[in-house]
Image (cartoon, rainbow, N blue to C red):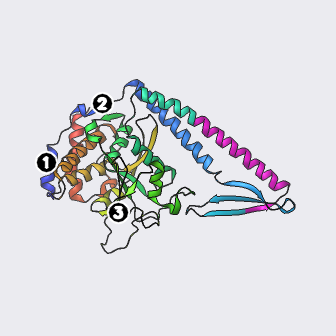
Amino acid sequence: MLQASQQGERSEGLSVDMDDFVELNPDQRREKVNSDQRYQALLNARGALAGYRGSLVWHGPDGSQRLMRSYYDRSGARRQKTLGSRSPQTEALKAEWDQRRAQAVQVFAERRETMERQAAINRALRLGRVPLIAAKIIRALDEAGLLGAGIRVAGTNAVYAYEAAAGVFVDAGVTATQDIDLLMDARRTLRILSSEDVPEGALLNLLRQVDRSFERTRETFRAINRDGYLIDLIKPDPRPPWKMERDRIGSGEDDLVAASMEGLAWLENARPFEAIAIDEKGWPVRMVCPDPRVFAAHKLWLSGRVDRDPPKRRRDEAQAAVVGRLTAAYLTHLPYEGDDLRVLPKSVRQSAEPLFRHSQSTFP
């Protein structure tokens, strides 16, 4: 690994041309705002509808019917709750529940239709950036209650969140990838908001809802589909090294087992960064990633590791430079200073500082 002073000197010479950023034009900016607002309204409607999962039905002979609520809990177990014998009060309760559920279904359908029209506009304006397979995976994690609650999008795909928040497009050479890294917080107990479609709450089964061809490889932290798209489940090295930590989400023997990697604790401990990006079909996708300042510093550190493949090191260096410049130029509410950066070792933090200082001196 490069010493901090060597890495700092090298980062002073990093430069990213303005051509690496293409700002959204006025039409794109307007529709990006509209898209974000309409997607948030759709998410709100989905959340409201989720409150009416399961069923509320009468059970038992006509003379002794009881109102029963059936649903799946967070562990995926089917639960039933008795709300009382049939009476004017329970009949009114069921009627109100049915009415509100019907309203929630209608609102969700209307907002989804609105979002379908918005997606067509987004496609026409070429706002779509996130690869479709990556977007589907991230949405599945979000709907399962994992995104931002123990799972973050790390690696190259995080750049889509940073550019979306900045209102720019980054050079495609920086973002092109055929995999996605899912950073797991091993300190938390993670559970999929299960249904009968996700047995044992397994992550691999959740991924198969996106693409049935996903299979775990011999590297047990990785899944691959028929097209060669890779999903890596990763987590920080335990501290201390002998500490036993959770390394999987599901309980199945064939589920993904997170690989421990040095340096990921910085991303795990960084403040979350949330943005709404747009996929290749024009549909928004909510993304939760590490703080871009910590991301850039981590990428620069990776680029200095002598045990990393040279092509990956050069790509890491380019991504560090781009994200550092983007953050300083457009995400000005995130200066490269303050308590948020204490998750980084001092040497790593100091080595990455020129990325942001150089950016700030370049842009007005």
Q: Let me know if residue 102 is in the magenta part.
A: yes
- The outermost residue toward the right is 63
- Give the label on residue 22, or none: 2
- Of the two numbered discs 2 and 1 on the same chain, state the one appearing first in sequence: 1
Separation of marks 2 and 1 at Cα, in angstroms: 26 Å
Nearest the viewer among 335 and 238 is 238
Q: Secondary structure at mark 2?
A: strand
Residue type, label 3: Thr
Relative image position of residue 325 (x, y in whole percent): 26, 40
Q: Residue at x 43, y 67 (%)?
A: 253
Q: Residues within 10 Å of mark 2 (few under 14, many from 20)?
A: few
Q: Secondary structure at mark 3?
A: loop
Residue type, label 2: Val
User: Position of 99 compared to 257: left or right?
Assistant: right
Please say if 237 is above or below 172: below
Q: Residue 337, can we see it?
A: no
- Residue on which disc 3 sits: 220
Residue type, label 1: Arg
Please say if 249 is above or below 353: below
Q: Residue at x 19, y 52 (%)?
A: 303
- Of the two numbered discs 1 and 3 on the same chain, state the one appearing first in sequence: 1
Residues drawn in magenta: 82-111
Quadrant holding the C terminus: top left
Nearest the viewer among 85 and 225 is 225
Q: Secondary structure at mark 1?
A: helix
Q: Residues within 10 Å of mark 1 (few under 14, many from 20)?
A: some
Which quadrant of the view contains residue 302? bottom left
Separation of marks 2 and 3 at Cα, in angstroms: 39 Å
- Give the label on residue 10, or none: 1
Please say if 270 is above or below 275: below
